[in-house]
Image (spheres, helix red, strand yellow):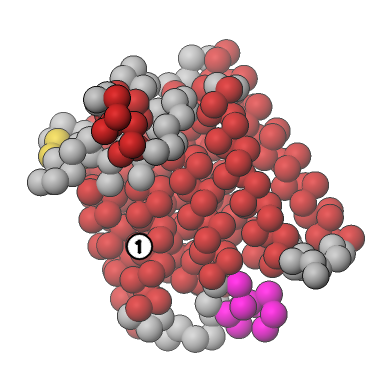
């Protein structure tokens, strides 16, 4: 029994295009980053935004949802390897999997293991790929019903919040952030009010924009705006609470799960 259907020619073409395009973008960003001394957090966010935007495109260029899951799932492993081998500065460094065990048995400060003190690198790219894989697997009925008749728009809301909201929060926070804060119990998750405000506003705008592009018949005009408000509120709260790059898990999964629970 095979878990994957036989791929169509269109599926094979989409797979090849996805891998080639991703490699080209990463290499180009890496070359420009090294050549022109582009700040590392900027080059990472460029790749981050490309990845999140392209994940939205997967809904339309793939004929078989199973191979979308194969593609995004493979990036979990590939990002893991890239970080381990330190192939691309723009994708981050350090690789720690079993956080609690390492801390308990070695006495090592987990903050020192998970973050490059000079560059703030985390396993965020691995987490983000995992989140996207899970969301597209859970909300995949659109491939069977025919877009936009499906609930992929719920997955898209979480992906958009993490892609655009997080990227803008990082850029604004690092560039213009003057007023920092850290919520109680959120050790390792220091944010700025300016960055969090940017996250909220950008998510509030981008979620209904992408929903408008998809035009899901299930949503009313009112739900476009209430859904965007929920996405922005939940996403901003989770982003401010999540340390060591784990916002790449909590934000997309939390936003999408909240919308699903509330009946969107």
Which corner quadrant holds the C terminus? bottom left
Nearest the eye: 103 or 225:
103
Write the residue at 51% across / 64% down: 135
Q: Is residue 141 above or below residue 47?
A: below
Magenta-drawn segment? 140-150
**Viewer-proximal residue, 142 or 6?**
6
In this orientation, does residue 193 appear? no
Closest to the observer, 28 or 253? 253
Q: Is residue 205 left or right of residue 2?
A: left
Disc 1 crowd rating (10 Å Cα; few below 14, some 14-19, many 20+) is: some
- Give the answer, above or below, for where 25 lies relative to 108: below
Label 1, on which residue? 254
Q: Position of residue 247 (x, y in %)?
A: 35, 48
Q: Residue at x 46, y 25 (%)?
A: 93
What residue is at 84 percent from the left and 63 percent from the top?
7
Which of the two residues, 49 or 222, is positioned nearer the viewer here? 49
Q: Where does the image place residue 198, in percent across and percent down from the top left?
A: 29, 48
- The reply, left or right, for residue 164 in relation to residue 66 is left
């Amino acid at each position: 029994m095979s878990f994957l259907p036989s791929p169509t020619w269109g599926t094979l073409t989409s797979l090849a295009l996805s891998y080639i395009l991703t490699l080209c973008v990463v290499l180009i960003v890496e070359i420009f980053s090294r050549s022109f001394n582009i700040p590392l957090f900027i080059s990472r966010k460029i790749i981050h935004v490309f990845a999140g935007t392209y994940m939205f495109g997967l809904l339309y260029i793939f004929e078989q949802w199973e191979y979308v899951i194969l593609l995004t799932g493979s990036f979990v492993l590939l990002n893991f390897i890239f970080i381990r081998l330190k192939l691309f500065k723009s994708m981050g460094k350090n690789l720690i999997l079993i956080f609690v065990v390492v801390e308990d048995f070695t006495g090592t400060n987990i903050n020192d293991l998970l973050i490059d003190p000079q560059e703030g690198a985390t396993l965020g790219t691995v987490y983000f790929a995992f989140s996207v894989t899970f969301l597209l697997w859970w909300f995949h009925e659109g491939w069977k019903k025919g877009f936009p008749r499906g609930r992929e728009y719920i997955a898209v809301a979480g992906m958009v919040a993490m892609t655009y909201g997080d990227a803008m929060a990082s850029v604004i926070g690092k560039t213009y952030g003057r007023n920092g804060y850290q919520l109680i119990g959120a050790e390792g998750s220091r944010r700025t009010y300016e960055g969090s405000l940017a996250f909220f506003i950008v998510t509030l705008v981008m979620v209904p924009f992408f929903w408008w592009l998809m035009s899901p018949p299930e949503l009313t005009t009112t739900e476009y705006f209430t859904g965007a408000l929920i996405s922005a509120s939940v996403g901003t709260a989770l982003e401010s609470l999540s340390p060591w790059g784990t916002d790449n898990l909590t934000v997309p999964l939390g936003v999408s799960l909240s919308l699903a629970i509330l009946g969107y």
